[in-house]
Image (cartoon, rainbow, N blue to C red):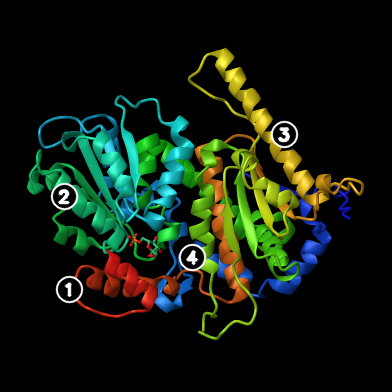
Amino acid sequence: MVNNKPASKQQTIETEFLNLDYSFQGLTSAQLKQYAAQKLPKNFNQLKQQLAKGEYKNKTEGRTVSHMLNRSIHNVVKAGNGKNRFTEIVRTLRSGKWLGATGKPIQNVVNIGVGGSDLGPMMGSFALKEFADDNTLHHLNTHFVSSMDGGQLYAVLPIIDPETTLFIIASKSFGTIDTLANVNTVKEWIKPKLTEKQWLANHVIGVSANNQAMTDFGIPPAQQISFADSVGGRFSLWSAIGLPIALTVGSNQFSKMLDGAKAMDDHFVQTDDPTQNIPTALALLGLYNREERQINNVAILPYDGRLRYLPSYMQQLDMESNGKQATHDNQPLKTPTGPIIWGGFGPNGQHAFFQHLHQGWDKFTADFIAVLHRQAPGFTTEVQNALREQQRLAVSNCLAHRKLMWEGFNSPQDPRNEYIGNHPTNLLYVDELTPHSFGALIAAYEHKVFTQGVIWGINSFDQPGVEKGKHCAVDILKTIDGHETQSFDPSTDAIIKRM
Ligand code: F6P
């Protein structure tokens, strides 16, 4: 039997750029305040200040954490070796003035990168497409290639032409094998039409914190855009790594995305009351669900198709940051840290995994993300009206499922129609999706992750756990390629033999 009453009054935090409704969390704001007093460290304000100033320490990697300094285009440009490369490159490419080696304008841009060098730029470019500055004289198609197996490249190469394609090699380290493997294949593919020299001179931009590696690779200095080593990969869409977003919407709109993030930064840093601070409240509600209700997963459910890449972005942001078993000072932790983040585009999830959410056996919590209105520019009035109606349809579904997940539905005579309920959820909503509100939403999640990391006493800015697998893969590849004959285990050995 379930009987969660709806909250007697709406529990909400409203700002000009993002709103959080936590009415279906089962915590009043007074309880949240009490919980905050127990959980937030005494020096929380000081830590927030350090983060804002780029002074927070990523001790294990021996550097500071500076992504919050990138919330202005001025700083993004300044990081580009002090030269105005970012905006200049954006302008030249978007105006069709960037010519390939054989004199044809660039029409396709392929971003080759993985993890933070892929997920943020891809999500932002897709979400904000309709806000492209209308001074675009020239249509640029943007593609994203990340997978080390070449599967994405395989699909993109047949629809582009070496003479009219520019590749962004996006890699903070400029040493990630996934990215370099894709780049190697591209170097083979251009051969019938371009020499490597021509390709490097006109068809490649490097975005990295490793200037030397870009130079060694042969990228001309004017086509290198750098950013600070202290910007973590999963926090890098605000830096030059966001170039594909700027190419899609223009520097001006990119700048508005940074402004939105800055507005959220100010809200986070300046609002002391945790019940009025969106990222802090998100962190505490998440913590409560993890520790008090033992829920180990969060579904990210955007109800606006433009945000469909948000769940995978959030997986890296949260899980790579807070999936840790040891503290800052390398002490083993006894309680669990970051939950499993998963999810998908909400309306489509309704026709796929929602059955399990409503009537399956597992506990979960979810963030519903809704956009209440839609302008739908560029269409006839009739089409705009139809699209707005679709937006209302999506929001009504979002509200309905969220309600059912919390309240449940009793049907003692007909168990097939019983809904368990009691699944706590958040609703994050904006009146309209704009570069500004998008920037604010993503920054809110960054600060939520930071706050939880601080409470757990972990370093949210390193990722030691992804290294072992990489090293092991090197040994296995040597054996597959026949350069070594190592034995691993009967299963691995059998697959290698079959290859
Ligand atoms: O393997 C993890 C990781 O280091 C991520 O943290 C990072 O975003 C990704 O790989 C890509 O790294 P890079 O931008 O250096 O190629």
Q: Earlier in the sequence, mark 2 or mark 4?
A: 2
- Please name the residue shown 51% across and 84% down the image: 329
- Residue 76's place in the image compared with 190, above or below, is below
Disc 3 element: helix
N-terminal label among 2 and 3? 2
Label 4, label 3: how many angstroms apart (C-alpha)? 33 Å
In contact (CB < 8 Å): disc 4 and disc 3: no
Give the CA distance from mark 4 to mark 1. Answer: 33 Å
Within-10-Å neighbours for mark 3: few <14, some 14–19, many 20+: some
Q: Classify mark 4 as within 8 Å of ligand 1 or not, answering yes or no.
A: yes
Disc ID at residue 483: 1
Separation of residues labelled 1 and 2 (CA atoms): 24 Å
**According to the image, label 3 marks what residue?**
396
Residue at label 4? 320
Q: In this orientation, does residue 97 appear?
A: yes
Read off the residue under disc 2: 187
Check disc 1: other Cα within 10 Å, few if <14, some if 14-19, many if 20+. Answer: few
Going by the numbered disc 3, the residue's amino acid type is Ser
> Where in the image, quadrant-wise, is ligand 1 located?
bottom left
Please report contact status of discs 4 and 1: CB closer than 8 Å, yes or no: no
Query: Do the CB atoms of the residues marked 1 and 2 lie less than 8 Å apart?
Result: no
315 shown above or below 101: below
Q: Secondary structure at mark 2?
A: helix
Residue 250 in the image: state x and y as whole percent: 37, 35
Task: Estimate the spatial distance between the alpha carbons at disc 3 and disc 1, rounded to whole Å.
Answer: 59 Å
Front residue of 413/432: it is 413
State left or right for residue 281 relative to residue 96. Answer: right
